[in-house]
Image (tube, rainbow, N blue to C red):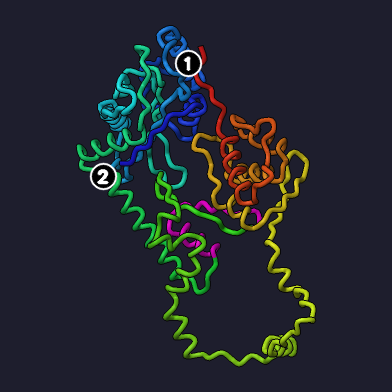
Amino acid sequence: MIAKADNITHGSNAVRYSADKELAEIVKVGHLPEGLTTSSIWSRMMLHQAQFKEKLQGHRRIKNTSIRIELSPAKEETKGWTMADWQKLADDFIREFDAVCLKRPDRQDDDPHTHLANSQYVVSLHHDSKSQILHLHINANRIDMDGNVNNEYMIGKRATMAANIINEQRGWVQSMAKREWNIDEITNACIEALKEMDSFDFNTYEAKLKAKGYGVNVIRDSIGKVRGYSLKKGNSTYKSTLLGHKRSLTPSRLRATWEKLHQDKSIHAQTMVPKKPQPITRPFASVTAKVTQPKQQSSPKQMPLRPTMSESTKQQPVMVHHDIEWNGRNYAVDITEKADDVLMKEMALPDDVLWSTLTDVQHTALLLFANYVDAATEISESCGGGGNAPESGWGRKEDEDDIAWAHRCAQKAFGMHKRRSRGIHW
């Protein structure tokens, strides 16, 4: 079993997603009446937090008001389970999660434990849409029933430690071992897919992986070039950077890996069917003659030759053009290839967003790069972001080159798509 946990600001959306998703079933609730609607569940959690206004008056501002946990046992581990079995798994996990003791080194007065068992929470059972693998979602209130704040320090590690204890108790595979097995299995599937291809084509590669039962998420830039991809097995996703030997299955190295796998076959084909000699065309002959001519020694009085067209072209940076349509308007963005690589390859999606896509964040960064600040802000706000919009006077510095400016635009776009903080204000 694998467990994930994080603190979130958008507890209402998380509860709605976990409880209202198609085929979702409510397993149990903690310190809440049975039969509540999704909106009523979160309303009661917020009302409970408001009841402890005075007790929390001196506490640090609570930005993340909810705890979200996902439990993903292996399919074979839950075969034939009833609802009572899922309820017991939820109870066992909450017990072990609360038992983990982790304390910040700089905050000795904090409670090192969480108290989910004494908090309002809802547990939902989800069916994976493709594989039908079952997994649990737990959404809990950060404020327990006594008005104490559940510790969020290293909450992801707490979940992993609790899952490993459950795995040991039940004789299941440890989460790290399962992760390594999955990576090895997916790597082998990728290698087999490449071996089965007579010629290299990413679309064929993607189709073969899907045929093997894996979910494939491909990230392409505005001109359709593959910048990254990830594979999903069950409820776990693995980026291409984790696969293969020394990142050999990443998009930039995938063709070379295919060529290496087919090297012996290619050599054999070249030996059996030699290539026909290609006729030398007149343009090729004239270029060759020009290149092979000896250089003339220029006299001291001779003026230096002007650079040829090819030489001057080499000095110009390669440009990439983007057309971004937004709200009935078209924005043209011209950017150097190196700066474009920064925004396409290094751009990331914030963890706590629900509506933004990676393309939305990339478009926001491109618009910032071209100084379309209003359009960039509109895109981020339409996706639920806008928490870190450009302030007055924000812009490119006089001595800032394209690469440094692209990095700053990427960082700003990432912050703009983070959800607005809706912490507790007293």
Pointer 1 residue? 46
Image quadrant containing the N terminus: top left
Instruction: Give the labeled residue for mark 2.
Output: 174
Q: Is residue 84 visible?
A: no
Residue name at image x 69 percent, y 87 percent: 295
Residue 187 part of the magenta segment: no
- The label shown at residue 249 is none
Marks 1 and 2, how far apart at CA: 36 Å
Of the pair 154 and 218, the residue shown nearer to us:
154
Q: Is residue 307 above or below residue 396?
A: below
Amino acid type assigned to the residue bearing label 2 in the image: Gln
* Residue 252 horizontal side relative to residue 235, left or right: right
Of the numbered discs 1 and 2, the one sitting upstream in the chain is 1
Q: Magenta span covers which residues?
A: 202-223
The reply to whether dot 1 and dot 2 touch (C-beta < 8 Å) is no
Relative to 211, residue 114 above or below: above
Q: Position of residue 188 (x, y in %)?
A: 37, 62
Q: Quadrant of residue 58?
A: top left
- Residue 41 at least partly seen: yes
Give percent across and percent down for residue 290. Answer: 72, 87
Return the residue nearer the eye: 304 or 361.
304
Instruction: Look at label 1 and name its amino acid.
Output: Met
**Element type where label 2 sits in the image:** loop
State the image coordinates of residue 300 (x, y, percent, origin top left).
Answer: 75, 82
Residue located 59% across and 92% down the image? 276
Secondary structure of the residue carrying numbered label 1: helix
The residue located at (75%, 74%) in the rendering is 307
- Spot occupied by residue 7 in the image (x, y as percentages of width and height): 43, 29
Instruction: Let me know if residue 207 is in the magenta part.
Output: yes
